[in-house]
Image (cartoon, grey):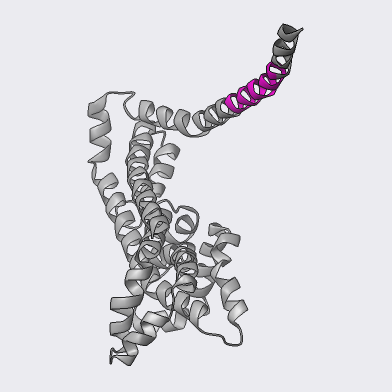
Amino acid sequence: MSQAIINEPLPAAARARKPAARARLVEWALIAVVLLYAAGLLVAPLVAIVWGSVAEGVGAFVRQIISVDALSALKLTLLMAVGATVINTLFGLCIAWVLARDNFWGKRILNGLVDMPFAVSPVIAGFMIILLFGRNGWLTSITDALGIKVVFAMPGILIATIFISIPFVIREVVPVLNQVSRDQENAARTMGASSWQTFRHVTLPAIRWGLLYGVSLTFARAVGEIGAVLVVSGGVSRLTETATLFIFRSLDDRNAVGANAMAVVLAVVSFVILMVIEFFKRRAEKN
């Protein structure tokens, strides 16, 4: 009788282990599905691009990358990305400050306009630039008077790149500014610090990781832009052709090695940017 009492709980324990085993099985199944999904959408295309870039040998890959057209496209892409990042960082900080610290009529409208590049197709954005600065555009008389050519020239590419990458600095800095206490800023002003000194020594250190995260996202978005740039640049080789347009033209010219080689370079740049973003994200979370 005593032996039966001792053995009685064992079936219940065994039944309790079955749901746990099923839960682990479901968990591993979900992990397998996620890995297959990621491999199919991310790893497989990267492998295909790398394989296509060296299909005719490493020498062909190197020749395509160091060609005059490729180097010119890379140079223009990096130049436009850096220019757009600098401009959007400066103006993005100002807009983020206004949205986080000031209350005024039209604040919600401004807040909504910041997200317009997310809602508007880049192709439509390029078309809007043509309507403003193209032949018979609304602002063409002003640019003609200043002797500036916008459409099918580098200013148009820069404007398009700035437009599609506007929101990132703002959207990363505003939440951080909302969390920053104003007590230290007020204390600095009480001690005689100017507005610039207060921002530089008090506010900027508090938002630096969020700001750098937004800057990294802005640069990454600018490097990979094609839609708006395709519309406003004209894609003239060695003049207004960016790296993404180089890939587009190479595919059209049936130059698969050149397209894949440039794609590999942009993939490497994107990977480095992602690593930088993750670094800034972790630092921001720690702070």
Asked if residue 23 lies in the magenta stretch, the reply is yes
For residue 218, what is the image quadrant?
bottom left
* Quadrant in the picture for the C terminus: bottom left
- Residue 82, above or below 56: below
Depth order, front residue of 224/93: 93
Q: Is residue 246 left or right of residue 118?
A: left
- Residue 239, above or below 63: below
For residue 121, what is the image quadrant?
bottom right
The residue lying at 33 percent from left, 89 percent from top is 189
* Quadrant in the picture for the N terminus: top right
- Residue 153 in view: no
Depth order, front residue of 103/287: 287
Q: What count of labels does the image hold?
A: 0
- Residue 165, above or below 30: below
For residue 51, what is the image quadrant?
top left
Depth order, front residue of 273/165: 273
Measuring from the top left, give residue 140's x and y in whole percent: 46, 78
- Residue 185 in view: yes
Measuring from the top left, give residue 142's x and y in whole percent: 43, 83
Q: Is residue 47 left or right of residue 194?
A: right
Per the picture, the main secondary structure of the magenta-coloured stretch is helix
Which residue, as the protein is rendered here, is positioned at the far front? 2
Q: Is residue 79 left or right of residue 108?
A: left
Measuring from the top left, give residue 228's x and y in whole percent: 49, 59
Q: Is residue 46 left or right of residue 190?
A: right
Which residue, as the protein is rendered here, is positioned at the far right? 1
Asked if residue 176 lies in the magenta stretch, the reply is no
What residue span does the magenta drawing correspond to? Answer: 13-29
Measuring from the top left, give residue 241's x and y in whole percent: 36, 53
Depth order, front residue of 72/196: 196
The residue lying at 36 percent from left, 74 percent from top is 90
